Amino acid sequence: MAGNSIGHTFKLTTFGESHGEAIGGVIDGVPSNFQIDLEAVQLELDRRRPGQSEIVTQRKESDTVRFLSGIFDEKTTGAPIGFIIENENQKSKDYSHIKDVYRPSHADFTYDKKYGHRDYRGGGRSSARETACRVVAGAIAKQFLKHIGIKVESFVSQVGTIKLEGDLTNISIPKVENVIRCPDANLAEQMIDYIKDIRKQGDTIGGVVFTRIIGVPIGLGAPVFDRLHADLGKAMLSINAVKGFEYGSGFSGVEMKGSEHNDVIQPDGSTLTNHSGGIQGGISNGELIYFRVVFKPVATIMQNQDSVNSDMEKVNVEGKGRHDPCVVPRAVPIVEAMASITILDHYLRNKMTQI
């Protein structure tokens, strides 16, 4: 099975399934002699882990990471960093009813048709549990980026039709996160109540995560196929349940004239506006990078649905198991992780292009 790695110089390869013994990964290309705050890595995992509030899945996992290589005396050695996260709360029997059944809008059908064999326990490799591995790599990348003055921060800007309005690039983010991870306390309460109501209905709802990357120097990215925004888009679209990515003015730019949309360059290299979202010609221009990631409603709902089985016979799929009614609260650290991995990879690649 190909497609399990991301990055060129800073590269992550992940392994494992939702209900296997463990998930884990190998991070290659990590510079040596860098002090790693292992507690900070675990704190990032704690932000993503299941069971942390009543509006997320109640699967109980500590998500404790154990490093196997590449870190000695809390410093990187330059060797590949290997790690595992043990699965502690598997309930594979919860999925026996879908052994030969394809759930609507899941990867069951496509995986089975492509590979001829699938791990149906919680979705196996297609499960969002795999994203914990990305958070480990992202937490390490974040620490490198902080060292060079780059900060990645994300928050929930929309759940269903409830959304933050106005310019989000300068919005203040509280130091203490609420369970929905929306910076507006009043909207956060509305979102939480809405998700609780959706859950009672046995249904799910989607949302949007807004991200800004502060302090990116000029020159990250490359022409044509390795454009910075293209790699950021690929990283975000590789996350489970993501249905859209837009950076800068995004789709709203279609309503503007070129004279309105163009970012006028000043003598100091800055721009009067930032409709470009900090990236021009696929290369960072030194301005703030910002983008939105759209998440669909979680496909597993606590309602029975019509579908087909492996013999392509019509069946009724029973809705049960432990799932998020809305994925965006736990998606925030995942989006930050993928952004950090991408930015650090391009930073290291850019260093190699200069004499």
Image: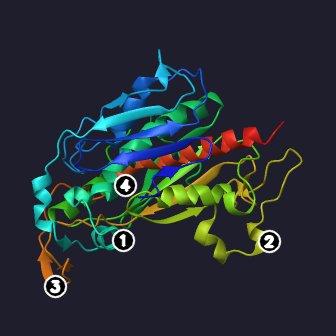
Residue identified by numbered label 1:
114
Secondary structure found at label 2? helix
C-alpha gap between disc 2 and disc 4: 36 Å
Eyeballing the image, is 330 above or below 113?
Answer: above
Q: How many numbered marks appear? A: 4
C-alpha gap between disc 2 and disc 3: 57 Å
Amino acid type indicated by mark 2: Ser
Residue identified by numbered label 3:
313
Please name the residue shown 49% across and 50% down the image: 5
Q: Residue 44 carries which label?
A: none
- Pointer 2 with pointer 3, Cβ within 8 A: no
> Which comes sooner in the sequence, label 1 or label 3?
1
C-alpha gap between disc 1 and disc 3: 19 Å
Eyeballing the image, is 146 above or below 216?
Answer: above
When asked about the image quadrant of residue 326, the answer is bottom left
- Pointer 1 with pointer 2, Cβ within 8 A: no
